[in-house]
Image: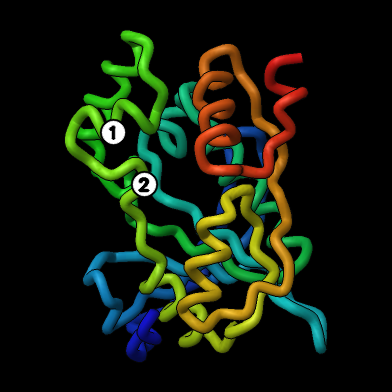
Amino acid sequence: MPQPGSATVRSRVRIPLTFPDGYRTEAEVFTFHGLADGAEHLALALGTVPDGGTPLVRLHSECLTGDVFGSDRCDCGPQLRESVERISEAGGYLLYLRQEGRGIGLYNKLDAYALQDSGMDTYDANTALGLPEDGRDYTAAAQMLNTLGAPGIDLLSNNPDKAAQLADLGITVRRRVPTGVHLSASNVRYLTAKVERTGHSIELSRLVG
């Protein structure tokens, strides 16, 4: 895969964060010029990386329904909350990527939900709409990491495709660190499909046991 071109920091600003459960931290938020897809992705620097350490990084795709409204149909909101705390403790970056619905957009994601209600899994619903199962490209994420001086990372993710794409783009993924299992009655089929269809590192026994 061709290596991504360079990006530059457009702005940086400190923002205090408070989550609904009361957890508080502070992030330095970076915006960028020159990202490959032209989208308004953000990097949140959290905590302090120890001298000689490797930053812990989460590539978190935007999910309005889960991140903002607390939808139980996915695990995105709990993963975001967990990631912010773990990265704050270890030191690193949360890249908040504007890739709603694994890259298909908000309206298409809601259309896919309607198909899931008729029995399809999350991937078959996308393809039934003529859309990719997962349309995300992480070129901009690799650009952001290089710009931030983080060409080698520990990746906080259950998704092997994120690690594979970053490696192809020249980012050294020292290890992949799984997130917790955020199970609800409404997302068990969704999480099971992620394990069975795309090899996510989630313990199925905790989903169906």
Q: Is residue 3 left or right of residue 149?
A: left
Q: Residues within 10 Å of mark 2 (few under 14, many from 20)?
A: some
Q: Is residue 111 left or right of residue 118?
A: left
Q: Residues within 10 Å of mark 1 (few under 14, many from 20)?
A: many
Establish if 123 lies above or below 143: above
Q: Give the position of the C terminus as an image quadrant.
A: top right
For the residue pair 139 and 168, the one nearer the viewer reads as 168
Residue 144 image point, x, y percent: 44, 78
Residue 167 image point, x, y percent: 55, 75
Q: Residue at x 32, y 22 (%)?
A: 113
Q: What residue did someone put label 1 on?
A: 126
Q: Give the position of the N terminus as an image quadrant.
A: bottom left
Establish if 146 lies above or below 99: below
State the image quarter where residue 27 is shown.
Answer: bottom right
CA–CA distance between discs 2 and 1?
8 Å
Q: Secondary structure at mark 1?
A: helix
User: Which of the marked residues, 2 or 1, is nearer the chain's N terminus?
Assistant: 1
Q: Residue at x 51, y 79 (%)?
A: 145
Asked whether the residues under the numbered discs 2 and 1 touch, taking CB atoms below 8 Å apart as contact, a structural biologist would say yes
Q: Is residue 99 left or right of residue 53?
A: left
Identity, as a three-letter code, of the amino acid under mark 1:
Asn
Q: Residue at x 81, y 80 (%)?
A: 50
Q: What residue did someone put label 2 on?
A: 134
Establish if 145 lies above or below 110: below
Identity, as a three-letter code, of the amino acid under mark 2:
Asp
Residue 204 image point, x, y percent: 71, 27
Q: Which mark is residue 27?
A: none
Establish if 184 lies above or below 175: above
For the residue pair 34 and 46, the one nearer the viewer reads as 34
For the residue pair 167 and 67, the one nearer the viewer reads as 167
Q: Secondary structure at mark 2?
A: loop
Residue 102 image point, x, y percent: 36, 45
